[in-house]
Image (tube, rainbow, N blue to C red):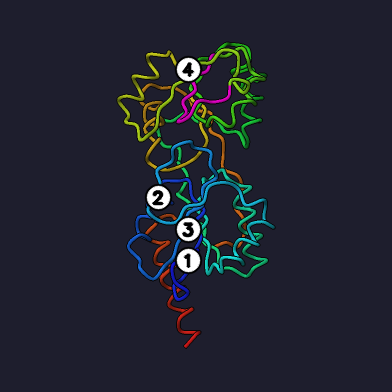
Amino acid sequence: MPSSSNNFRILVLGGTTEASALCRDLEKEPFISATLSLAGVTKQPHLPTLSVRIGGFGGFDGLSTWLKTHEINAVIDATHPFAATMSQHAATACAVTQTPLLRLERSGWQETPGDTWFHAPTLTDAATLLANSPKWGTTPQRIFLTTGRKELAPFKTAPQHHYLIRSIDAPAPVSLPPHATILLDRGPFDVQNEARLMQDHGITLLVSKNSGGSATYPKLEATRLLGIPVLMIDRPAACPNIPTVESAQQAMAWLRAYQAASTRRKV
């Protein structure tokens, strides 16, 4: 619970480097009581000194109740760009409770000269391309699959390929394609090691979500260096009419402005 009834109480929906940066800034704010919420996907997350809750809320109804019970003044949704369900729940709950909501989301990666990108709207579409397209479906590929351990099952429909799968935590064996090599590692990574990894494993295609950010961007630099094509899963559509910023600094500026405005309304 908040440490003081006079504090400005916020909820940060986290799990990204931007959320971690925001929490470091919030630790320095004595008149803001912040709670960081994590989904609990990563087994040993890096935790701030702020109040932390781990696990789901029980849909937007549960989140609405939590916001009202804890008298939250504002919510910052700093979840992963592909955490579309949580972002939708946040938008709905904040609309119901009339709680101001800010989306903190890093910009996506952009294709540059020297890149060879192909696009798919979803993981399932990407797996279908790998299974059936004339370009990849007929010739076994050695694929560097960096989509996260929770979303591997669609690629079981393209069993003719060999997959190098990198994840922070080990994926469930039942979700794995039949020909898979597991690499447990946590970023950030550098381009030299990424290029060496791809060469050592004979990678012919990288599959990635367009997550953005600098921590895993070197894998794209390595594909450019080595001439390896990329199958990029595009981001889901954003929730409409939600103000959005790209950095923790911008989020803090929004918070301070809203906090100041709230204080003036109470005077």
- Distance in Å between CA atoms under marks 4 and 3: 43 Å
The location of residue 144, given as percent across then percent down, is 48, 22
The amino acid sitting under disc 4 is: Thr
Residue at 67% x, 20% y is 157
| Residue 148 horizontal/vertical position (percent) | 52, 32
2 or 4: mark nearer the eye: 2
Q: Label 2: which residue?
A: 20
Q: Is residue 168 magenta?
A: yes
Which of 193 and 126 lies nearest the eye of the viewer?
Answer: 193
The local crowd at label 2, few if under 14, some if 14 to 19, many if 20 or more residues have their Cα within 10 Å, is: some
CA gap between label 1 and label 4 equals 52 Å
The residue drawn where x is 32% and y is 31% is 190
In space, the residues marked 1 and 3 are separated at their CA atoms by 9 Å
Magenta span: 162-172
- N-terminal of the pair, mark 2 or mark 1, is 1
**Mark 2 and mark 1 residues within 8 Å of each other at the beta carbon:** no
Question: Is 195 in front, or is 10?
Answer: 10
Along the polypeptide, which appears first: circle 1 or circle 3?
Answer: 1
Count every numbered label the image shows and give the total.
Answer: 4
The relative height of residue 70 versus residue 112 in the rendered view (above or below) is below
What secondary structure is marked by label 4?
loop
Viewer-side label of 1, 3: 1
Q: Is residue 178 part of the magenta span, yes or no?
A: no
Instruction: Name the residue that disc number 3 marks.
Output: 35
Tell us which disc is closer to us: 4 or 3.
Answer: 3
**Earlier residue among tags 2 and 4:** 2
